[in-house]
Structures are given as structure tokens and as C-alpha cells.
Image: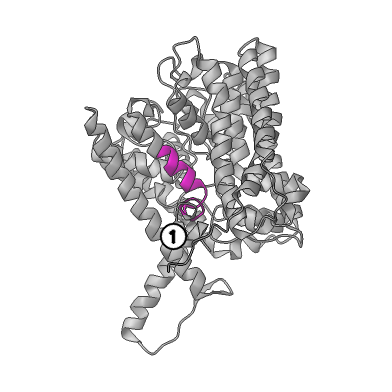
Amino acid sequence: MSERVTTVVDWRTSVALTGTVVKFLAVAMLVPLVVALAYGEDVGAFGIAIVVTVLSGIGLEQLETGGDLRSREALLFVAITWFAVAVVGAVPYILAGMGTDSTLADPTNALFESMSGFTTTGATVMGNIGVEHHSHALLLWRQLTQWLGGMGIIVLMVAILPELSVNGAQLVSEEAPGPQLEKLTPQIAETARILWKAYFVFTAALAVLLYGLHLAGLAPDMNLYNAVAHAFSTLPTGGFSTKADSIAAFSAAVQWVIIPFVVVAGTNFALFWHLFDGEFRRPFRDPEFRLYAGATAVLTAVVAGLLFTGAAPALALGGTTAGVPENALRQAAFQVTSLLNSTGYASSDFAQWAPHGQLVLLFTMFIGGSAGSTGGGIKVVRWLIVMKVLRRELFHTAHPEAVQPIRLGRHVVDEEAIRGVTGFTLLYLVLFGLGALFISLDATRVGITLTPLEAIGASLAAIGNIGPAFGRLGPFGSYLLLPDTTKFVMILLMWAGRLEIITVLAIFTGAFWRR
């Protein structure tokens, strides 16, 4: 007689808590509602969206069973919450798009834009009437979704909701980018508040600096609205802009100010806590930060050399770089820092660069930000561990009897963590490859021919939460031309990539639901 299989996951508790998070999302919608009232645009769209959001949250909360949020329920809660907020976040796009020629009235396009925002991907399907023809309120909501998703919605909820602090460590761990979470204080809720405070301070500082450039006459288009909007998408390494030409629409001074903040966003935020606590040498002793800074510097130098010699000229936007040191260095530093940690801003149309310049940028996109940052991708610390593992294997070839632990600084990395890093990296690369193959074949199915670089870039841009790809899908292009099936696959890749893949894939396995 076969053993009866029973479900051991209390999904109702997970869904009910998701309702609580969804309900709080209505508070965030008040910000674009105020902007809508100020400009007299899309007031009804955000008013209705707030009502729908609150009612949806309350409805989901009715499933509460009073059960505990155990390990599997916590994992399920994190996964479905991120998808749920993207679904609810799509409502303003749909409502604002109705009655216009905006493509966002289509639910698939609206969900794509919303998921891209919350996962800080920065890929867009705004095509027919262009970014700048949408209302101030809708564009600010687009920027705000990235800011909420950057440090993490669950991290924010752990910081403010007492009922989540009990299992807060696991919740934050499932959501946080990277393989490790440094607990800065004994209470995880206090750690979450520290991270969000640092995140808020950096965001405010950038907004003030950008608006200061405007007041000084160095950035005519960087008014208060644009300053706040771009601060909202810089610190989360999001990449959305209120301008169709991204940061290329602004002055060189704006680009120089944004570059260091992009670097900050890709740095482990725990290092800033130690820095503010007086440990000034801590970042420079951190092996991940040293590799992150070194990779940024080397790749910037390589790209700057290509641009300066004219081997990879910036043709469409960004001006002449051949023989112009300042512009070559600025364009190189901006694109490398933007793509290395998945920000996705553009200061020039790198889709027009020579092939070898684009290949360097493609390599850059594989690196990712630091663990504990808002950056996407594989993460620097994983590459550091993988390189150390490869070096150890080469050493063991000559010295098979030697015992050589893997160290990060003074700490020994246990073998279980090494297996986890190796497994994640392989899974990431496999999903990336399958995604590129599907995107290429699906486009061919509907009569669209994508170049290999376009298909590879689109898959990497989705799973790495990077945003722009190459060719027609480049920084000044749009994913609108792709079929809905491809868009939905990219939505799933963005979702999985933001939650470090395992969190999402686990809930689709039979073992997760059985005793």
C-alpha cells in the first residue's frame, strides 16, 4: 500500500501575510497620488489603484489561520509577496494607460514594467508614446517601485512590522542579495532599520546634490522632480529614468555626480555601518570590496582606452570620445559602474559601439554587485569564492594530499557554503542560457529576427536585473517588440533573479510541499 503524501506547508498563513504587505503598498501609492494632484494628471488612476490595493490586501488577510511562520512558510511568503506586489503595482499602469495610445494598458506590458521596477531591472516596454509622454505621477511611481525593491520590501516590513521580526532573519536572508547576511545588531529588526536608514540617507544626499547642480546652473533639466526621481532609481541600482535618453539627456556634471553613488549602491551596505562606527579601514580589508573596486577600475581603464583610441566610438549620444580624455573616461566609468552592478543607466548608446567594446560590457554584466548591496547579478563574493575553488583544484593536482581551506580574509568558508555558491553559479548560467535560447526561438516564431547578442543580452538583462541589452533592446530601445510569451518568461527571470533563484524555484518542486 502506498504511503499517503500530505502537504505540510501552511500556505494560508503565507498568503495572509502577503496581504498585509500588499495593504502597506497603498501607503507608497500616496506619493504619486500627491504628485498627480499637483500636476492634475492621473488622479483617478491612483485613487482607484489605492482602493484596489487596500481591498486586495484585506481580502488576502482573511486567509489567516493563526499558524506559525515556519521555514517553508517563510520561503513561500517571500516568493509570492514579490510576485504579488508586482501584480498590484501594475494596476496604476493599466488604469493610466486606458483611453490613451499607451502600451501599458495591456496587462502583460503593465506587469512587465511593474516587475522590472520592483526587481530593479530597469527593462521597459514603454514604446508607442515614449517615456516622456506619460504623466509625472506615473513616472514617479515607476521610480518609486525601484526604490522600494532596492533595499528590499521584506527588509522594510521586518523593520516596521512586529509580527515578522520573529522569523526576520530567515525572511531577510531569503530576500537579501548575495550568499551571506551580516547581522549588525542582536535584533534583526534593528539591523533592517539600520540598512534602510543608510539607504534613505544616501538617496536624500544624491537628490540634494543633483538639485544643487540645477540651482548652480550646471544641469538645466535636473529640476527637483527629476532629482528626486533619479535618486529613487540610482541607489537601488534600478536604471529607470524620466527621460527617453536616460542620463545622456543630462549634463556631464550630472553623470560625474551619479557615478560614485552607483558605486556606493553596489557596495555591501554593512561596510558603511562599520565605516560610520569608526572602523575606517574595514572596507579596505574586505576581500569582496577590494575585488569589486579593482574590477571597476580595470574595466573602466580598458573601456576608456577603447573609447579614446576610437576603437569603440560613442556614435549616437554622448559625443566624441576619440582623442577626448575627459569624455572617454566619463563614458567608460559611467557604463562600467552602471552595468557591473546592474544599474542599467546609460550615458551614451553603447548599442552603437564597435563589437569588441560591446563584448567588454557583456563581460562586465556577468559580474554583479556585492553581497548585501542593492546590485543584481551573480555577485562579486561568489566569483571570488569560485576563483579560489578553481585555484585550489589546480593546487591539488600537484599536491593531492594537501588540505587547503578556502578563506575570505581571516575567515574560513565552510564546504557547505562553497557547494551552495558553486550550485547557484551553475544554476544561474544554465537558466541564463535557456532563457537566451527561448527568447531567440520565440522571436523567430513570430517573425522577429534577433541577433545572438540581442538574445543573450535580453536573457542576461532579465535574470541579472540589469535592464538594457544590445541592438534594438539596447539602452535607448524597448522590449515592446518581443512577443507576450517572451515578456512573461522575462518576468519570471526577473522575479527569480531578484530573489537569488533558489527561493523561487524551490516552491515549484514537489519536495517543498510534501512531508
Please determine whether, in this image, residue 298 is positioned above or below residue 415. above
Please determine whether, in this image, residue 323 is positioned above or below residue 211. below
Relative placement, left or right, of 425 versus 454 is: right
Relative placement, left or right, of 139 versus 212 is: left
Quarter location, residue 424: bottom left
Relative to the observer, which residue lies in front, 132 or 441?
441
Quarter location, residue 15: top right
- Tell me how the rendering is colored: one colour
Please determine whether, in this image, residue 316 is positioned above or below residue 118. above
Question: Which residue shows up at 71% across the image and 60% down it?
Answer: 184
**Is residue 501 a member of the stretch shown in magenta?**
yes
Q: Looking at the image, which residue sits at the far bottom?
A: 401
Residue 497 spot, x, y in % from top left: 47, 47
Relative to the observer, which residue lies in front, 62 or 489?
62
- Answer yes or no: is residue 459 visible: yes
- Answer yes or no: is residue 466 visible: no
Residue 60 spot, x, y in % from top left: 65, 37
Magenta region, mostly helix, strand or loop? helix
Relative placement, left or right, of 330 versus 391 is: right
**Is residue 300 a member of the stretch shown in magenta?**
no
Q: Which residue is mark 1?
A: 424
| Boundaries of the magenta span | 490-505
- Number of numbered discs visible in the structure rendering: 1
**Image quadrant containing the N terminus:** bottom left
Question: Which residue shows up at 22% across the image and 33% down it?
Answer: 444
Element at label 1: helix
Question: Which residue shows up at 55% across the image and 17% down it?
Answer: 95
Question: Which residue shows up at 61% across the image and 14% down it?
Answer: 42
Q: Looking at the image, which residue sits at the far front?
A: 1
Please, what is the three-letter code of the amino acid marked with disc 1? Answer: Phe
